[in-house]
Image (tube, grey):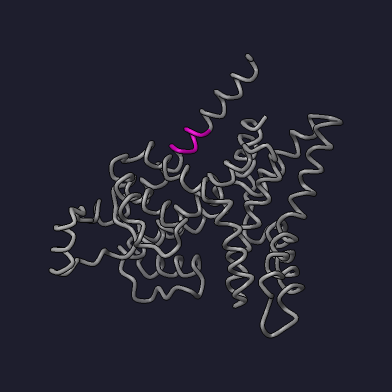
Amino acid sequence: MTFFSILFALIAEQFRPVTSSHWIVRMCNRWLNWVAGEFGGKTEEGASPVGARMACLVAFILPTFLVFLVYVTCMVTYPILGFIWNIVIAYLFFGFRQFSHSFTLVHEAIEAHDLPAARLALGEWYGPELDTSDLSETEVISLALERAIIGSHRHVFGVLFWFMMPMGPAGVVLYRLADIAAQRWSERGDFNLSESARHFFYVLDWIPSRITAMGFAIVGNFEGAVYAWRYLTQKWPDSLSAVILAAGGGALGVRLGEPLSEPDSDEALRMAEAGEPVVYEVGLEPTERTMRSAVGLVWRLVIAWMALLLMLTIALWLG
């Protein structure tokens, strides 16, 4: 059932994508804003540590329980309704088009050698947090690749992992709400709320992020991905994103993130005496061709996941 639910959801998304203005996106944002306001918006100090944890439980667990209740009720009464419910939830929370449109705009501008348009598209994608006015073409491509790699995990592979868990569609809702809250609550300036949401999402995403990194290594440059995963994750502050970006960049054979700083003579001598390996960058500077390769990398991993799901489905049927 999981295989066909994902397949039908992907097909439906190609004809009617779920964009940022879709009603489900607006509903999730309003729900998370309401919970944050109730638990942290009534005092200047924001939410207390206990209140922030309660906000996470209410914001994530309550919708998850409702989705799971509907799923169980459908499966007990009419299993075909449970199958349809799976497709609906997968369509609303799973898919490429929720992040690929912005990547395509940047890619098309780079293909047309229109750097100002590429900067503009990248700025709209990242929002006010990023000043794109002075970025070079290589920097634009690198930042677009980073955003797309993380987007592919959080909208596709991470969701797919939780969809395969016993909770089914409820796991999808739990994962996506936690991801959205970790981003939105950080923008509110409420330290306890944002930290609680990030910690909650860290627990949910620790295993999926590493499975995605292993998947990139399998369908891409294996040696480059493993080396970057082992030695280059310190280039990014977020440990979850670092694993995915390091493996993704290594699998593509390109350099992502800030360049590594060269060790000074004293540090190099200390590393040599301690027998520590010298860490070096892997891959080439990203180009327009890399953007096309990134699309292929993601699709290869999707096909690998779907093939695995199909084999498991057939094995269950035959068993």
Q: Quadrant of the C terminus?
A: top right
Q: Quadrant of the N terminus?
A: top right
Q: Compared to 16, does 279 lie above or below?
A: below
Whether residue 316 sits left or right of residue 289 in the image: it is: right
Q: At which x and y percent is residue 15?
A: 62, 44
Q: Quadrant of residue 184?
A: bottom right
Whether residue 286 sits left or right of residue 204 in the image: it is: left
* Residue sticking out furthest to the top: 318
Which residue sits at x=84%, y=30%?
A: 78
Stretch in magenta? 300-305
* Residue sticking out furthest to the right: 77
Q: Compared to 319, does 294 lie above or below?
A: below
Foreground of the two, 260 or 219: 260
User: What type of secondary structure mainly makes up the magenta span?
Assistant: helix
Whether residue 249 sits left or right of residue 270 in the image: it is: right
Q: At which x and y percent is residue 181?
A: 63, 63
Q: At which x and y percent is residue 288?
A: 32, 54
Which residue sits at x=63%, y=51%?
A: 175
Q: Compared to 262, does 62 lie above or below?
A: above
* Residue sticking out furthest to the front: 274
Q: At which x and y percent is residue 118?
A: 40, 65
Whether residue 69 sits left or right of residue 50 in the image: it is: right
